[in-house]
Image (tube, helix red, strand yellow):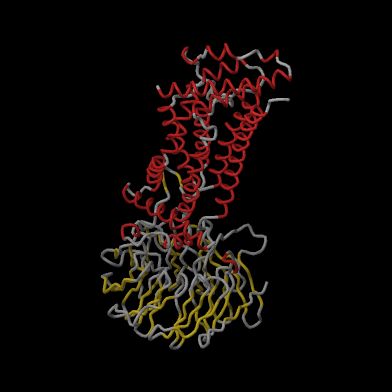
């Protein structure tokens, strides 16, 4: 009889050990590849550009990577930018386009501001910055202003694209859309400051910029001599438009990254934790008994139609609230998350979803309808 | 799945993100420096596991003389393997010991990858996501935005130089820790492992944010230093550094040679099949005797 059992056992243990090593290595590699590619946060820009309605046309960003002009009456697409087979890649569109003097102005994440002919979408001129453009452009008196992640605010002539003045540079990237009022351009920067510069010369309009406690990505809103802007320090600030002095500040529960809505003496805004606030525009006191709790991030600016305040969240929830009390009147599901601003036109509220679809909601009852964008 | 994501964030991602932001604030707003400090701290936390592996390496290094004797004595590869495993068992060496520190670091890598995408991804959506992971302390919140620049690198984007460094440092570490092979098959496997792992990690480093590659480079450097301090260079010299073979075993001291082993082992070239079977039984008895001897020595 052969007594080889113990020797065989030891050999098998050696083989098992090698096999276990190889298996461990294989599993490790596989799990590493799978988990690192599947999990984790977002690294590629997606965009959240809001639609813009002008006369009878709708400017919309399908999939947030191109711009389309849609004739609402004829239900046809007039043009698309970039045109098919073009080698231009916008990467993503975040800011709402602007229209001035028959020119469509749009800033793209690829760092370029494009000026397109409204009639046919052909490129009139373009200007490249050194960083991504996240905020939208704003046009006033023949000049378009846009901020860039290269930390600078640019001003170009709408007609020819000539630079009006040297870029005004800040300490950090500019992700907000500027606001223009009474010859002054107001904008915020991620260097925690709010700036005011002369719209013609680009010179500083305030003795010094206003400094908040945290970065500011929101678009400032100017109303009745006050600049309202929310920051990533949880505060909504009200500043004197003439000198940048703080009038009041209201502490929310989380970062504020949406454009405030001022209506009827109340400032409406949302936070990234989903709370919606209605604050007295003069005193900074909460007008409602308590903030409204929405399900999801409130990134896009709210809209009011009559006495109804409409807000939308990144979870695809759209709410209609009583503007005077903050209580919910209705809620609907958009199907896909909403990070864009809400736009009012003809009594309806329009917005873009994360997937690039355009929808409109009836403020009276919350009925959501998709706006078909023809191919 | 939501529960898993919640736990994953709560246990790993959130603490790591906040720790990095805290270090960023403490170290002049340099996120790269905070990754380096964090790496050193993580190596400290996993040091008990690393120490086990280092002790294994040291024990294997001390046994190199006996292992070389076995290589010379036994021509049969199977017999060589058996004798090698006996020695491993006597010394309490676990051939899988090197895997444990690596497996322990896996969740750290995954979490760090998630954190880097949130903190230095430099994309608006990731900044929104970041708000959900930071603790509601003002000195944490006010650190945003975090700078993704570090000595000319964009920590949120892949970098070829760091990817190459990742592979290179891992290669050196592998060379120092891979034991000399006892036969051709082991040598082949060791050689494969030696270049496969560094190549694999180089590929990963090219695909992922360079902040993760920075972590790997620093981690490998720390591992090399620890290996050198506790075990030595493992026979690694500048001459054999670039070779794709593991570093040769260092020459054994005279005390490592075991005369007893030479006297008791029969010459296996002369054994037939039946003699081999009987030999296995005799081996078993000798193994038990040696184990008892080894235990008595250890007690002394």
Q: Determine which quarter of the picture holds residue A55.
A: bottom right
Q: Residue at 57% of width from left, 43% of height from top?
A: A28
Residue B181 is left or right of residue A190, and the answer is right
Report the front residue among B59 and B165: B59
Judged from this view, the residue extending furthest toward the front is: A1
**Where residue A157 sits in the image (x, y, percent)?**
46, 67
**Where residue A171 sits in the image (x, y, percent)?**
35, 56
Figure check: A286 above or below A22 = below
Figure check: A55 above or below B119 = below
Report the front residue among B166 and A223: B166
Figure check: A30 above or below A362 = above
**Where residue B83 sits in the image (x, y, percent)?**
59, 22
Q: How many tags in the picture?
A: 0
Q: Residue at 41% of width from left, 43% of height from top?
A: B42
Q: Residue at 46% of width from left, 26% of height from top?
A: B58
Q: Quadrant of the N terminus of chain B?
A: bottom right
């Amino acid at each position: 009889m052969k007594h080889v059992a113990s020797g065989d056992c030891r050999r098998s243990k050696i083989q098992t050990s090698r096999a276990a090593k190889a298996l461990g290595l294989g599993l490790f590699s596989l799990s590493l590849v799978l988990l690192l590619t599947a999990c984790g946060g977002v690294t590629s820009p997606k965009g959240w550009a809001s639609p813009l309605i002008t006369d009878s046309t709708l400017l919309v960003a399908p999939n947030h990577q191109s711009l389309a002009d849609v004739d609402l009456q004829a239900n046809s697409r007039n043009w698309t930018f970039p045109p098919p087979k073009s080698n231009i890649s916008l990467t993503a569109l975040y800011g709402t386009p602007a229209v001035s003097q028959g020119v469509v102005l749009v800033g793209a994440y690829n760092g370029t501001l494009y000026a397109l002919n409204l009639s046919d979408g052909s490129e009139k001129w373009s200007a490249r910055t050194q960083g991504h453009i996240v905020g939208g452009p704003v046009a006033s008196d023949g000049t378009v202003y846009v901020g860039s992640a290269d930390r600078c605010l640019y001003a170009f002539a709408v007609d020819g694209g000539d630079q009006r003045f040297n870029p005004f540079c800040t300490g950090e990237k500019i992700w907000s859309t500027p606001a223009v009022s009474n010859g002054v351009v107001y904008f915020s920067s991620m260097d925690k400051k709010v700036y005011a510069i002369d719209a013609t010369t680009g010179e500083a309009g305030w003795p010094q910029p206003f400094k908040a406690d945290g970065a500011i990505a929101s678009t400032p809103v100017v109303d009745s001599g006050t600049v309202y802007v929310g920051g990533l320090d949880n505060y909504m600030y009200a500043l004197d438009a003439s000198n940048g002095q703080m009038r009041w500040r209201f502490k929310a529960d989380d970062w504020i990254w949406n454009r405030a809505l001022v209506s009827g003496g109340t400032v409406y805004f949302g936070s990234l934790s989903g709370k919606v606030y209605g604050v007295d525009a003069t005193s900074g006191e909460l007008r409602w008994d308590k903030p409204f709790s929405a399900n999801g991030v409130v990134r896009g600016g709210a809209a009011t139609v009559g006495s109804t305040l409409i807000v939308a969240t990144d979870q695809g929830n759209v709410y209609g609230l009583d503007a005077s009390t903050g209580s919910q009147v209705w809620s609907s599901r958009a199907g896909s998350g909403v990070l864009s601003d809400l736009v009012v036109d003809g009594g309806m509220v329009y917005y873009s979803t994360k997937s690039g679809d355009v929808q409109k909601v009836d403020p009276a009852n919350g009925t959501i309808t998709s706006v078909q964008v023809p191919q | 799945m939501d529960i898993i994501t919640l736990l994953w964030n709560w246990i790993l991602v959130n603490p790591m993100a906040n720790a990095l932001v805290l270090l960023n604030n403490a170290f002049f707003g340099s996120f790269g420096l905070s990754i380096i400090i964090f790496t050193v701290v993580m190596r400290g936390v996993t040091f008990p596991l690393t120490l086990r592996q280092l002790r294994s390496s040291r024990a294997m290094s001390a046994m190199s003389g006996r292992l070389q004797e076995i290589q010379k004595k036994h021509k049969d590869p199977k017999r060589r393997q058996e004798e090698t495993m006996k020695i491993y068992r006597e010394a309490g060496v676990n051939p899988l010991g090197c895997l444990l520190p690596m497996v322990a670091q896996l969740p750290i890598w995954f979490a760090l990858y998630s954190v880097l995408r949130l903190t230095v991804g430099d994309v608006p959506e990731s900044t929104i996501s970041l708000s959900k992971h930071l603790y509601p302390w003002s000195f944490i919140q006010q650190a945003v935005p975090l700078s993704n620049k570090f000595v000319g690198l964009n920590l949120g984007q892949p970098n070829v130089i760091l990817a190459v460094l990742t592979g290179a440092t891992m290669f050196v570490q592998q060379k120092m820790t891979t034991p000399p092979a006892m036969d051709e098959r082991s040598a082949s496997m060791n050689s494969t492992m030696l270049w496969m792992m560094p190549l694999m990690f180089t590929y990963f480093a090219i695909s992922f944010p360079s902040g993760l590659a920075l972590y790997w480079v620093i981690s490998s450097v720390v591992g090399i230093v620890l290996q050198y301090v506790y075990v030595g260079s493992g026979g690694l010299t500048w001459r054999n550094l670039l070779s794709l073979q593991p570093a040769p075993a260092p020459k054994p001291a005279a005390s490592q040679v075991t005369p007893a082993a030479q006297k008791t082992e029969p010459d296996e070239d002369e054994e037939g099949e039946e003699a081999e079977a009987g030999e296995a039984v005799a081996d078993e008895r000798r193994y038990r005797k040696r184990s008892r001897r080894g235990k008595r020595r250890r007690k002394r």
